[in-house]
Amino acid sequence: MKRLRSILLTAVIGTAVTPAVTLAREPASKAERRAAETLSKMTLEEKIQLLHGPMPGLLPAAKRPAGMAVGAGYIEGVPRLGIPRLVETDASLGVSNLMDLRKGDVATALPSGLSLASSWDPDIARAGGTMIGSEARAKGFNVMLVGGVNLARDPRGGRNFEYLGEDPLLGGELVGAQIAGVQSNNIIGTIKHFALNPLETGRNIHSVNMDEGAMRESDLLAFQIGIEKGAPGSIMCGYNRVEGEYACENAFLLTDVLRRDWGYKGYVMSDWGAVHSTEALIKGLDQQSGEQLDKKRYFSTELTKALDEKRIPVSAVDTAVRRILYSVYAYGVADNPLQPGQPIDYDANADVAQRAAEAGIVLLRNEGGILPLGSSVRTIVVVGGNADAGVPSGGGSSQVTPVGGLKRTSPGAPRGPAAGFARRGYGGTAPLDALRAEFPNAQISFIDGKDPVAAAAAAKAADMAIVFTEKYSTEAVDHADLSLGEGQDALIDAVADANAKTVVVLQTGNAVLMPWQAKVPAILSAWYGGQRGGNAIARVLSGKVNPSGHLPVTFPASVDQLPNPKLPGSDIPPADKETRAVYGLMAGLQPYDVSFPEGSDVGYRWFDKKGLKPLYPFGHGISYTAFRYDGLKVTGGKTLTVRFTVTNTGDRQGADVPQVYVTRPGKAKRLIGWGKPDLKPGESREVTVTADPRVLADFDAKAQRWVVPAGTVKVEVGTSAKDPVLTGTARLSRTTRKP
């Protein structure tokens, strides 16, 4: 497999020059032909059978197919025609066993999506996808519900930890690589949740209202790039409405954009509980998933009635079945039967997870070069964060029970929409154990941090204090604010007052506020670290790994800087109604409108447009070495190419993430590409970025064209969206292209 990042002297990232990943799959024309041939042999009953399926965990054991792996859902096959059963599992961070009623099932847990995005590395994303896809197939699954790329429009979003940040180019590139890795195992991967589904509050009743140009330039562009790069076999539509129409029956999204403009050939499955009518079939939805969570069995019992009454044509059934069969053939699902129970090399897979976690850790602050820790440190007190048990994970359908199990658990939510399935757990390698292994000659003690006075006393007696913090995030619930909560800010204050050498390790699924920042010389963002998160943190603290992560989201200085200072929907409806609304089980709830004033200017673009100074900007990350940028060369015309040289001027080997931003007159800056050269001390490398024209363009909804106007643009090469190092200009010619 050819690497996406050049191993020569040029590092290239940019949709225009990064080729779509070549998958080992059947040619499209052959898959289409096979699908048509099989369709012609099917009875109507067999066709309908492919359009719907249940959640096996909600079925009595006697009614589940014998020997089938229990996951998120399944679609019964047609054995006489060689159509296999589609056995589905969550999710992007590993094989989720949330719905598996068996005890003791485990899987390798990848770090969170924001951790993956912090790597800015498609190779890391693909390796992780390949690994979790191999485990899914070994366990008996041939459909994996991966590929979350909803943009992080609000740092209070409960599901942001699963996703890949706030920028459409970064998210699209990485999700495409991850999906390609998953599907290399001859299974179908998804991309989700299509589209404009960045909030969990009332997710089944809110309606996102946004003009088409803004959609195309932000959230839809992330999906478009991800589909081009990863070629997912399926698209999962979301719970929300878009311009008043449910996403899973939104003809604009599913027919106009996905099929007409993007030429997508695979099938669209619903999210679990996101179907509201049989008519969704003629608007672009092909499959009803987890049908017990919907009000009715719209794509089976209700569909049969609609066909008899001529309200739905049989041709609509044929179209949906043909799309499903296409993916079954194109991705080798039909030709590679499942054999559940295959051996899994969990040690090798944990290595993959650890590399991903190490690549995703972001060093936010390192005043006085306090890190990495040296051998002179003799006594260390580790405080809080359940660091003696493991690393935290996010809750919901993406949650993975890691190899070794969860060492400590508690309810993720005592009531409300997450109470039924979210759990707060700690697993993988414990940071405390990893630090003791990393520093065998140091005396390392642990205190749980529940009593700030006791923690401060322990910190005062030690050479150094490392405070582990956490903030739990879960599907179905957004955060009320950006604080760490649970008294952790006061704990950090107390420890930092007692010991000037205090390090804070953030384990969160989102950006957080840091009222104690000026007191703490070193801050790491470790996100949710996955299977060997503790090892990754310890190796970065010791310097065995030089941190190379850079933020994929902006850390605001306050909620007042956000486009929506008040969380949309935070005042609707009571918890008991909200629980049912989340799953689509309650009729009569009126939709409420959600608007995003930033439009296409998500995240750092909003901060640039408004001239706001964040706590930490998008793209920020510190290394233990230093880098110099020089030799800027910018070439304009019909496209934009930027070349420059990166030199490691420090005394350690390390990887850097130089970022290229472009600002058009009157517009917010936009990321057009980046490199990730890994350099030895004194080594130099040229980085080349060629812009995808869509990142430079406006979308003209009336003309249905991307338009790059003629004019001079400003080019910046920087260490973040707020820290330019090299600047230049280029003259662009007017160009247009189809959607």
Image: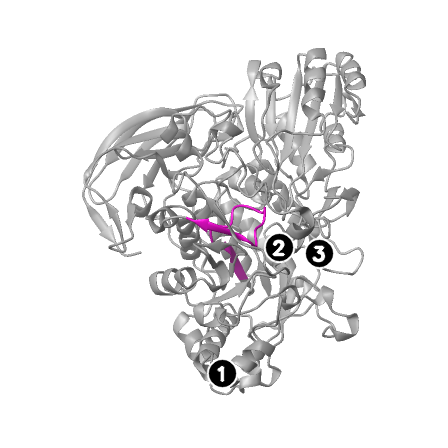
Q: CA distance from mark 2 to mark 3?
A: 24 Å
Residue 629 screen position, x and y as percent: 36, 25
The residue that disc 2 covers is: 581
- In the rendered view, would you say 55 is above or below 679? below
Residue plotted at (56% across, 37% down): 359
Q: Is residue 537 visible?
A: yes
- In the rendered view, would you say 229 is above or below 477? below
The residue that disc 3 covers is: 97
The residue that disc 1 covers is: 38
Residue plotted at (44% across, 48% down): 172
Amino acid marked by disc 3: Asn
**Image check: 521 left or right of 655?**
right
Q: Is residue 371 visible?
A: no
- Residue 358: image quadrant is top right
Q: What segment is highlighted magenta in the picture? A: 189-209
Residue 168 screen position, x and y as percent: 42, 45
Front-lying residue, 485 or 57: 485
